[in-house]
Amino acid sequence: MKVTIIQPCMGRRSGEAYIRTWQMEPLAPAVLAALTPDDVQISFHDDRMEPVPFDEPTDLVAITVETYTARRSYQIATEYRKRGVPVVMGGFHATLMPDEVAGYADAIVIGEAEETWPRLIADFRAGRLKRSYRNEAGPALAGCMPDRSIFAGKNYLPVTLMETGRGCRLGCEFCSVQSVFQRNYTGRPVAEIVKEIGQLSSRILFFVDDNIVADPERARELMRALIPLKIRWIGQAGIAVAFDPELLELLSRSGCQGLLIGLESLHPQTLEQMGKGFASGRGYYEAALANLRKYGIRIYATFVAGYDHDTADTVRQAVEFSEQQRFYLTAFNHITPFPGTPLYSRLQEEGRLLHRRWWLDEDYRYGMLPFTPQSILPGELEQCCVDARRRFFGFASILRRSLDFAVNSSTPFMWFNFFVINILMRREVLQRKRYPLGDESFAGPLLRVGEAPPDTAPELPQHKSGFERVAQA
């Protein structure tokens, strides 16, 4: 039996290479490969950097679907299903929109795959593949080491992605993480994390946890275990960690080079509306950032705009604050209502969505505002975000921030990477604008479950060994 795992790209402009800063090794396919029985042959293809070999024989295709990659995922599924190859889809979007995803896949995985994927493989082999697989209780996250051998020969950026836990206990209105994990956090066994790090040779690790300090006591245990390993790592954390001196000290000693922290807004009313009222007090951010600076922790700050009180001045103030604080990196984006989130439901009830399902709309492009804000025109807000990135990643701003020798350039390694990353981000400012969702060169309609393939299907190679087993059920 052969399983083909696909990492879909978000989309593709005809005749252009995919955006380089988005080409990091994807962790989900490596986890799926590790969960696959040893006697199953695995083929992995990354749609972001190589053509998908649709005519290569395989029994089953697995695709992890995110909201931004949904349209491209359905295009890929269409090509395989036209050839008689069954497709399984999982991931955040499959969990949040199972009925939609099930329309383009022979089976879907809802929730985490640690327990359901081996069961799905067994069912497929026996010819009794079900339409959906759901893991009601979250997995213990023990005993599954990602199989990174599938990345051999790929030209990824030199950052190794690693997971130490899943979920977040915060309830931000716009965040799909809290919707998928129900505001819970589950950590992997620390001993297994240490073992996995020992098998890696990367210069720097990116812990992809949505909030690596979601459980402070568990975070302390993890940081103490990392200290002897002498690694460099970056991760994502909630701003409240800045007021825990013991944990800050452990973060610094463990090799933390920087944290991605969602500041989101500087305005108390907006923070209250998005569910981050705890950060709305006067001087809260300034005090928190001063504490992080004290421990040499660089900041990748994120801001979003588009809430009811936001205007062009909101974005401008975020840029000025970011330059004043000399952040290593900053993201300036408009808010995007993801399906399954309280924000999406609220905007839908208020009749403010501009697209029923923006991620599938042929007229929608990355960076477009999919709803009507209260205090600014959609097109104006889109341009404000582009202008903010252009200013922050302008050469003058990069140079000024590089002279922060206390934090940004405190080591030769991080000083060098400061210029590399900021210049990459500068190049990407206009690359991102109006980027298509789905491949522009894809021809024909998407093939839904239950529909007959187009008339040209008999001319395509038919790889039916797996499909026939399913059809016999």
Image: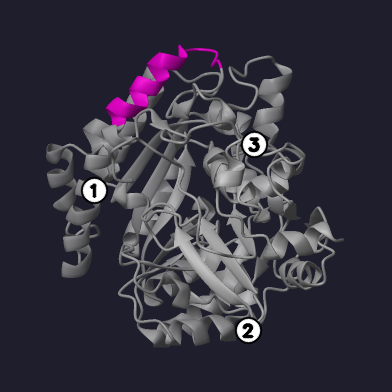
Q: Which residue is mark 3?
A: 173
Secondary element at image label 3: loop
3D distance between C-alphas at marks 1 and 2: 39 Å
Q: Which residue is mark 1?
A: 424
> For residue 256, what is the image quadrant?
bottom left
Name the side, left or right, on which 69 lies relative to 123: left
> For residue 136, what is the image quadrant?
bottom right
Outermost residue on the right side: it is 473
Q: Which amino acid, by three-letter code, is at mark 2?
A: Asp
Q: Give the vertical position of 334 relative to 464 (above or below).
A: above
- The residue carrying pointer 2 sits among few (fewer than 14), some (14 to 19) or many (20 or more) residues within 10 Å by Cα, namely few
Q: Which amino acid, by three-letter code, is at mark 1?
A: Leu
Secondary element at image label 2: loop
x, y percentage for residue 309?
52, 18
Tag in front: 1 or 3: 1
Q: Which residues are magenta?
A: 372-388
Seen from the viewer's position, the closer of residues 111 and 155 is 155
